[in-house]
Image (tube, rainbow, N blue to C red):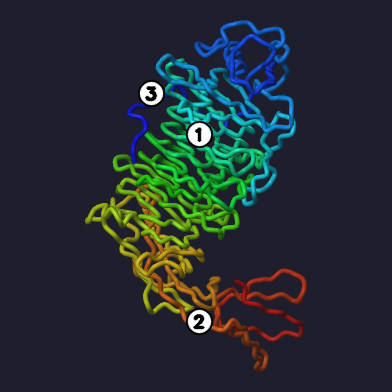
Amino acid sequence: MKKLHALFLAATATAVLLLPAAPAFSATVITVNSTNHVDASDSEMTLLEAVLYMNQLQGAPAATLGRSLSTAEAAQVSSTAGTNHLIQFNIAGAGPHVIAVNSAVDVDGQGTFWAFPILATNVLVDGYSQPGSSPNTNAILAPNNAALRIVIDGDTNTFRLFGIVADHDWLRGLSIIGGGRAAVFDGEAGAVLGNAVIGGGVQGCWIGVAPDATTVKGQGYAVASWATGGSQVYGTDGDGVNDRNEFNVIVASDEMHIAIGQSDNCRVSGNFINVLPDGLHSSGVAVGEGDGVYLEDGGPNNTIIGTDSNGISDENERNLIGGLNGSDSNCETIAAWSGGTNVTIMGNYFGVGIDGVTPLPNKRGICNDNAGSDNSWLVGANGDGLRDEIEENIIANTTVSRVFKFPSAKTSIVFRRNTFFGNTADFFDGTSGNQNSYNGVILSSGDTATISPVVSNATTRAELIGWVPVSGDPTALNRTNAQIHIYEADPTAAADRPQGKKWLASYADNGPQDLDPATNYFRFRICSLPISSTGASITVNETCGDDVSGGSSRFATAVPLPDVPNALSLSQSGGSVTLSWQMNGRLQARPSLTSGSWTNVPGCSPVVLPATSGSLYFRVAQ
């Protein structure tokens, strides 16, 4: 994958992901009442003039209006108590109103041309202030129903549209189409101008698609943080306040849709990425590299892609990434040039629409192309037992090359409790020969060892039997026994690239559920797991080590299970009742057929219970 920048200038400050709420102050409000893209002393306030004048009010070192306002323009400026300066819209007519961009400003004197260079801090450009517009109100797994009335059209120009080189600036409720780049938080230009570029973000926007939800005109790339002080938010911030209003739709970017380089603590949540507002179709544009989310240079660290699983609005923090089938040799759903530590990728839909079924195939999957630095990614559930079902990703319909690529032993990708199906690509990077081990750092054969657990053919519906090549290493610090993740296998996967479609359980080698005392060998009771009665196969993968220098293995070759009747039988003899069944699942009982809570009955078939004078109703729950 090509690097876009040979050098990033160091940012001058750092920040945590979620900044405390800013105190209220006397905020400037500028009302845009024209679709023109001019700077002229006349009766109209254009968006360009509003941006330049806001910069001027804060004493920006460049990109200011450089003149006094006309009387009519000055009438569009007021003040109010608030936490953000506001650029709002009140353009006459029903709209949508198109601001056709035909010129740009050299922001730093070094050839960085922006149509709208924002150098003022705490500025919100709010397209939803335009009468007739409204933000999305649907959940992330439903069509995006935002009504946008302000369109920024860069046409086929190569210059950039919004350039943000100051702290805590936000774009909201805009349709941005065409141009070279839609919105970039630019720490490189910020460093030249003495700004840190901390916080801010893009929320509730459609980028690359017009308000009619079908007209597509993308950019080279859509939104990005380059060498900033960090903490930018693309999509929802997940604070439980108006989170659905904050979803973005970002499509048809030729190089990348969301890019983060040398900018820590950023967040990408609640976005349709190359997925149109209906949630069921991709842009259909044959883009080039077209990465969904791209991470580059010196990190970025502590990046959240999807849910943060903190119990607040987690179900609305997913991203959908689909239809990335460009002509470039890369075109990943998530791609990294230099990795990053503590990157979490949870709760996303890759390669499917909002229904979790409609195929939106991606050319390639998740790639960490770093070969030189220690870094760690978590893909899927963290396994703490809290909201794990929300943390699962769907990773489906990957069509070329690989589902995962990580060519270094220093790269740890831990994946657990995800759903894999319809992937015709190799699971790990088999086409280039870099089938790297999930724990190559502790293997004598080096980081290119190709290993996976084995499920024995002696496995039955009652017991899963198998072994792992590498389990706990007693000579390594902080290393634990292998975690064995049990899945019902994807029936559509080729035999030489098995994948788990339905997560069933996770147990530890030599843990309390392991009936085989030998290290690296396991035997688990699986009769109570929710396995299909017909057409089921079992596979496992392993997470080894401390989740930092370890990682996750490929899946074991799937072993088919015999089909069984989906029936429960009961017999009574003397003072006892015997319940028998062949399908997998948990036996449950309750005293009423129509009400009350089902309680689990311990044990596998057959279960013998004492007969009582009252009634009990039973089921096998899956």
Please say whether residue 387 is visible from this viewpoint.
no
Q: Nearer the viewer, mark 1 or mark 2?
A: 1
Residue 278, given in percent of the width and then of the height, sits at 62, 49
In this view, the residue farthest toward the left is 445
* Identity of the residue drawn at 45% across and 63% down: 485
Q: Specify which label sits upstream in the sequence, 1 or 2.
A: 1
Q: Specify which label sits upstream in the sequence, 3 or 2.
A: 3
Per the image, the residue denoted by label 2 is 563
Disc 3 to disc 2, C-alpha distance: 62 Å
* Identity of the residue drawn at 38% across and 53% down: 404
Disc 1 to disc 2, C-alpha distance: 51 Å
Q: Is residue 8 left or right of residue 536?
A: left
Q: Secondary structure at mark 1?
A: strand
**Mark seen at residue 223:** 1
Crowding near the residue tagged with mark 2, few <14, some 14–19, many ≥20 C-alpha atoms within 10 Å: some
Type of the residue with mark 1: Val
Q: Specify which label sits upstream in the sequence, 3 or 1.
A: 3
**Mark seen at residue 231:** none
Type of the residue with mark 2: Asp
